[in-house]
Image (spheres, coloured by chain):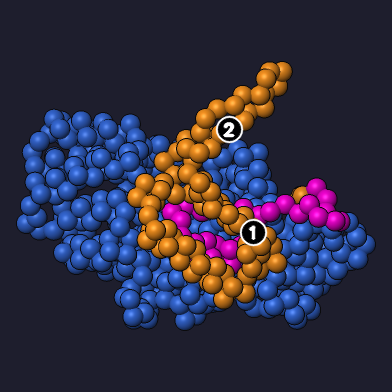
Chain colours: A orange, B blue
Amino acid sequence: MTQYMFMLFDDEKWFDDLDEQSWMEGMKLHADFTAAVEAAGAKITGGEALLRSSTATTVRNLQGAEPLVTDGPFIETKEALGGFYVVDCKDLDQALELAKKCPSTVIEVRPVMETGEGAGPPA
Amino acid sequence: MADAREVARLVDEAHREHWARVLAATVRLTRDLDLAEDCTQDAFVQALRTWPDGAPEKPAAWLTTVARRFALDRLRRETNLRRKLPMLIEEPGDDDEDQPADPLRLVFTCCHPALARESQVALTLRLMCGLTTREVAGGLLISESTAAARITRAKKKITAARIPYRIPSDAELPDRLDAVLTVVHLVYTAGHVAAGKDLTRAVLTGRALELARTLVRLMPREPEPQALLGLLLLTQARRDARVSDDGELVLLADQNRARWDLRLVHEGLARATQALQAAGPDGPGRFTLQAAIAGLHVTAPTWEATDWAKVVTMYDALLVRWPTPIVALNRAAAHSLVPGADLNRVLSELDELGGEPALASYSYLPATRADVLSRLGRAAEATAAYDEAIALTSNETERRFLNRRRASLQV
């Protein structure tokens, strides 16, 4: 099994009209996704939803200068990082199949680096 | 003791016919592409050394056994290899068997959607066709270092992202197979029309045809591989008529059909027909439709007598399966040739495509506009369109052809 991070990018319209009902709908979509992962024999080992990107503060550590603190996310794009999952999958094919069921417009799927005991530099 | 040249020829032939099969069988053992390639290469070198004393009756089996033996040796001796992240092999059982499906595992891995198309092509040429990095570079008109880097990155992605070495499930197969067929077709077209002076690069077209045949052999019930093979054969059949004795490009319209290879035509048509008949419940796939269109061209007694209305109907079906600007352009071009076609309407169809970024550097669009404009008697605009086309083509033979068409307008 290999761990992949799913980085969820989406426009932030959901936040604009947020109320009790759209909140429940969003949570249900993610509950459905969790069920799909389990049904596939994979496992979610981590993950969080994030507040909208305007709540972010970015710290940039610069060589030979004071760290720079700015208001907002690192990259300003139409689709912002909205959350992540860490999913233990059989292989990339399974990870991609699951990403297709993940409730987000864009998902970057990237393998997690092994850093536990006995790990070494990746190839 | 056999003649050295004869042995070299036998090994060369075995390389062309069996490289993928030997490599694929070795990958399953090594779980590492680089090691598998090394051992496969060594097996062919061994063949050159020992076959002068008697070539085996079954070269593929011999080569596979030898390559796998080299692999086992190295795996035992070089324990640091075990620390490298191994490829994911599904159903790893039967390690001593040469599984017929292995080349399919290999080609589906080469053409995995997680790899960029250009990486898929380079990897297929390297791993399925056994071309050297230099040959891959030459075939794709890129530098050797670019080719090497592209192949290395692709192999690293396969390992790091854990792309599994397997044949896709039935649910995945249509999309995955489409990618493989697209890559094989790209290999063929890379060889068929080359930028620069030469019109064909025989090595790539030959390899594409062999790949297509392998896919048909390994997936006999799938219609699309049949269709691709049919399409390639029908295109290949016209090779000798495509370039005149002076090395000039001859379009299908002007080709001497007597120079077509009838054997390839017949086989191509048989494959295309088979594919059409085997079409699934969703109707013919895009390669089946392309092969059918090629079939319509080839069975027409002359260019003028081609059933253009039927060709347009086929393109309409193809557009549903494959809604791209290039298909729309080809459809408009065919439409312009239907007897009694409203050329002004065709012109507006072409003009609509003018905004498509995908066609921005495609000389065929202005060339087609030029042809329609000239038939409408609008010579000045036709000349401008030919100029546009000439500026866009990177193929010398095509440029000479367009220049001649442009010059004929002045008459």
Residue appearing at x 70%, y 67% in the figure: A1
At 42% from the left edge and 58% from the top edge, which residue is drawn? A23
Question: Quick one: label 2 or label 1, which is nearer the N terminus?
Answer: 1
Q: Is residue B380 visible?
A: yes
Q: What residue would you read off at disc 1?
A: A46
Report the quarter where the C terminus of chain B lies: top left
Does dot 1 land on a helix, a strand or a loop?
strand
- Determine whether, in the image, residue B358 is placed left or right of residue B386: right
A7 or B190, nearer to the observer: A7
Q: Which residue is mark 2?
A: A58
| Circle 1: residue type | Gly
Under tag 2, what secondary structure? Answer: strand
| Residue at x 37%, y 46% (from the top left corner) | A16
Question: Above or below — where is B330 with respect to B385?
Answer: below
Callout 1: chain? A
Q: CA distance from mark 2 to mark 1?
A: 23 Å
The x, y position of residue B150, in whole percent, is: 62, 45
